Amino acid sequence: MPRSKLDGMAYEIPVTQARAELADLINRVVYGGERVVVTRHGKPLVALVSAADLERLEEAAAAQEPIAGSVSQVHEVPSAPRERQRFGIAAEYRGTGPS
């Protein structure tokens, strides 16, 4: 399972391989404390981080000036339902703030 280390505990993995290994990647993130960067055509696409890491990122963002597109400001885009259907994604982010 070839992965290249990015910085610290982050690993890079192509999206096609990540789909096939999602359960393993989730376990590595949750139980191994790793961070995984999923790439498409060699470019970072998304990152898998633990819920604790996400909470720390949101707290850090809240402590600074508001940044457009921060983790706490996730919005549904028109193509998202089509992408969920295309990739078989069953979960979606539901923010805790007002919609």
Image (cartoon, rainbow, N blue to C red):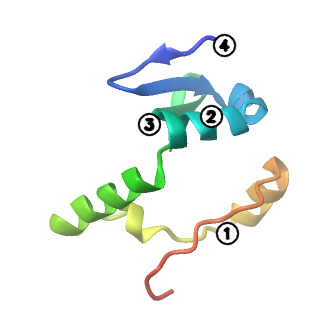
Residue lying farthest front? 31
Residue 35 seen in the current view: yes
The answer to which of marks 3 and 1 sits earlier in the sequence is 3
Q: Which residue is mark 2?
A: 25
Q: Is residue 57 left or right of residue 86?
A: left
Expressed as whole percent of the image width and height from the top left, the position of residue 34 reads 46, 33
Q: Depth check: give the residue in front, 87 or 50.
A: 50
C-alpha separation, residue under disc 3 versus residue under disc 1: 33 Å
C-alpha separation, residue under disc 3 versus residue under disc 4: 18 Å
Q: Depth check: give the residue in front, 81 or 19.
A: 19
Expressed as whole percent of the image width and height from the top left, the position of residue 7 reads 33, 23
Residue 1: which numbered mark, if any?
4
Q: Which residue is mark 3?
A: 33
Residue 63: which numbered mark, if any?
none
Q: Which residue is mark 1?
A: 78
Give the mark toward the camera: 3 or 2: 3
C-alpha separation, residue under disc 2 versus residue under disc 4: 11 Å
The amino acid marked with disc number 3 is: Gly
Per the image, label 2 sits on a secondary structure element best described as helix
The amino acid marked with disc number 4 is: Met
The answer to which of marks 3 and 2 sits earlier in the sequence is 2
Q: Residue at x 82, y 52 (%)?
A: 88
